[in-house]
Image (spheres, rainbow, N blue to C red):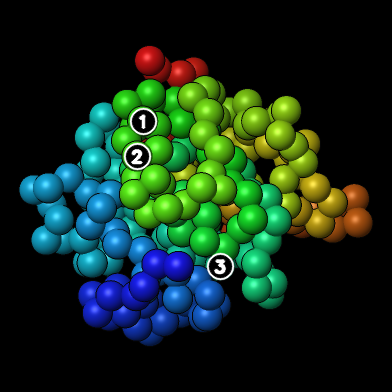
Amino acid sequence: MIKPTRKGQQLAALLKHEGISHPRVLEVIASTPRELFIPDALKHKAYENNALPIGQGQTISQPYTVAKMTELLLGQKNHGQTVLEIGTGSGYQTAILAQLFNKVYTVERIKALQFQAKRKMNQLDLHNVHMKHGDGWEGWKSKAPFDAIIVTAAASTLPEALPAQLSNEGTLVLPVGEKQQQLKHIRLEQGEWMEQTIETVKFVPLIAGALS
């Protein structure tokens, strides 16, 4: 169990003020050391509510966005079973999910980022994370179905492979769009798709293919 820090608790309090209400999400935000996932030169900004560059043209998402997307995945439940993350990136969102879901499957197209994120999971003693180097547009079919899927880069359109990998009553949260991006919350309820637009967001693009 990772213990909360003073700065983490201050960040959680800020996010609560911004509208994040799920108690477990706020607990995990308070206890996850965000500075671990940020380049040394930017560690002093770790607990600001901003996205930050992590190299390779990628960013670590704004804490509010991480918390909001996680809250949407969980809904009213206190925990989930299996979640698929598209875009491991720094590993910060992965670490948040690993403390809330029984199993986390995460796909990253940039090998160097995947390697760094794996080291950080080990540092935090989070051993329920399964990583794959691959194309996020394809999901992870062999491990499906998932109770929840989160995409941490903006797809120009909804990737066709992902909804098919959800379990019944599963939840998909992702940003969709190019210049204008909207955070979408998509649920499969009794065989019917329910889609809700949450808010305007800004993410790096979800690019097809994988880099070594």
Work out whether 35 lies above or below 76: above
In the displayed structure image, the side of residue 79 where residue 20 appears, left or right: left
- Mark before the other along the chain sequence, 1 or 3: 3
Q: Does the CB distance between marks 1 and 3 fall below 8 Å?
A: no
The residue wearing badge 2 is 119
Residue 112 point in image, percent of width and height: 32, 26
Work out whether 107 lies above or below 66: above
At mark 3, the secondary structure is helix
The residue wearing badge 1 is 115
| Nearer the observer, 103 or 185 | 103
Q: Residue furthest left?
A: 41
| Nearer the observer, 206 or 147 | 147
Label 1 crowding class (10 Å Cα cut-off): few <14, some 14-19, many 20+?
some
Residue 125 point in image, percent of width and height: 42, 53
Looking at the image, which residue is at 32% across and 35% down?
A: 116
Q: Does the CB distance between marks 3 and 2 fall below 8 Å?
A: no
Q: Amino acid at mark 2?
A: Arg
Q: Does the CB distance between marks 2 and 1 fall below 8 Å?
A: yes
| Nearer the observer, 72 or 85 | 85
At mark 1, the secondary structure is helix
Disc number lying in front (1 or 3): 1
Q: CA gap, disc 3 to disc 2?
A: 26 Å
**Which label sits on residue 71?**
3
In the displayed structure image, the side of residue 156 where residue 65 appears, left or right: left
Residue 211 point in image, percent of width and height: 39, 17
Looking at the image, which residue is at 23% across and 57% down?
A: 35
Q: Amino acid at mark 1?
A: Phe
Q: CA gap, disc 1 to disc 3?
A: 27 Å
Residue 187 point in image, percent of width and height: 74, 55
Q: Quadrant of the N terminus?
A: bottom left
